Image: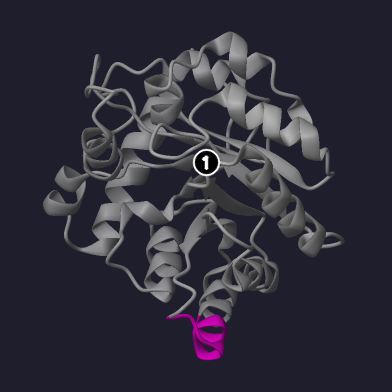
């Protein structure tokens, strides 16, 4: 069995502080953590605290999120998210877009990539029905127009499924675009994909542990590069309610994720 390094995605515990995200992921034995950054609340003291927690635990960050591209000029806060990601040693920045102008999304992503040039960090575009870049095909088309060495395409198992993605679509993605992927499971057929509120509610509350739903996550993982880091994106109200203690929630997430990984042929 090929081992994929696992990260605890930040959305698992939206109520956690940045330091708590690090400490919970490390406590559970994840290879990486994910970091959520609210730019208007993040201070130099926050950066110092997270750096100290990373040093104390030995945890590394797989990503920092979220750069949410919107209509209009590039938000300076998005450049700051990249800068903080670089300072914390995050490998990836997660970006989504609600700008209906694909060309404007392209240009703002390109500006972020230029800003990050020379640093060891990848600027990833995530697609999903909850954004204006709804499919893997749309995301790929935007990235092809940029063609920067530090660009990436982030595949989330739930968004890939609900947007009609196929394994062939994943196999067609250039391997150099893939810095990581996000896995979760969910029931099928799932929500009405024409109901925007239902799509968002499922994404933040309705996911389930790997192997406890019917998404084609085994096929998806087999189509991804060997050893690619995986963020476990089990955003779930049931998980939050069942494990209000952050460290115990992280332990449960690791337990179910590793069990599913170990059972793969």
Q: Which residue is at the front of the view, 184 or 132?
A: 132
Q: Where does the image place residue 98, in percent across and percent down from the top left?
A: 48, 47
Relative to 116, residue 163 above or below: above
Q: From this view, report whether residue 78 is shown above or below residue 254.
A: below
In the image, taking residue 110 as reference, residue 157 lies left or right, namely left
Q: Give the range drawn in magenta.
A: 41-49
* Quadrant the N terminus occupies: top right
When asked about the image quadrant of residue 38, the answer is bottom left
Query: In the image, what residue occupies the spot 23% across and 21% down?
Result: 190
State left or right for residue 197 relative to residue 180.
left
Q: Give the number of marks.
A: 1
Q: Does the magenta run of residues contain 16?
A: no
Task: Write down the residue under mark 1.
Answer: 100
Judge whether residue 229 can be spotted in this image. Answer: no
Residue 157's place in the image compared with 220, above or below, is below
Residue at image coords 53%, 47%: 99
Residue 211 lies, with reference to residue 147, above or below; the image says: above
| Closer to the camera in the image, 250 or 78 | 78
Is residue 45 within the magenta segment? yes
Residue 80 visible:
yes
Residue at the (49%, 62%) spot, across then down? 35
């Amino acid at each position: 069995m090929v081992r994929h390094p696992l990260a605890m995605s930040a959305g698992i515990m939206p109520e956690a502080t940045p330091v708590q995200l690090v400490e919970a992921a490390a406590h559970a034995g994840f290879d990486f953590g994910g970091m959520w950054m609210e730019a208007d609340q993040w201070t130099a003291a926050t950066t110092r605290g997270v750096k100290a927690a990373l040093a104390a635990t030995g945890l590394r960050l797989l990503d920092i999120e979220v750069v949410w591209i919107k209509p209009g000029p590039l938000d300076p806060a998005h450049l700051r998210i990249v800068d903080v990601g670089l300072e914390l040693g995050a490998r990836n920045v997660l970006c989504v877009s609600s700008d209906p102008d694909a060309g404007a999304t392209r240009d703002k992503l390109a500006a972020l990539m230029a800003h990050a040039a020379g640093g060891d960090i990848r600027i990833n575009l995530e697609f999903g029905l909850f954004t204006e870049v709804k499919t893997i095909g749309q995301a790929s088309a935007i990235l092809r127009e940029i063609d920067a060495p530090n660009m990436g395409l982030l595949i989330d198992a739930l968004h890939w499924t609900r947007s009609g993605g196929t394994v062939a679509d994943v196999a067609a993605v250039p391997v150099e675009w893939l810095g990581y992927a996000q896995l979760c499971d969910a029931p099928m057929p799932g929500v009405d994909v024409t109901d925007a509120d239902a799509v968002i509610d499922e994404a933040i509350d309705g996911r389930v542990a790997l192997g406890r739903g019917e998404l084609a996550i085994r096929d998806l993982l087999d189509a991804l590069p060997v050893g690619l880091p995986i963020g476990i994106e089990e955003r779930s109200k049931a998980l939050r309610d069942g494990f209000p203690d952050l460290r115990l929630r992280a332990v449960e997430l690791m337990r179910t994720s590793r069990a599913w990984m170990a059972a793969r042929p």
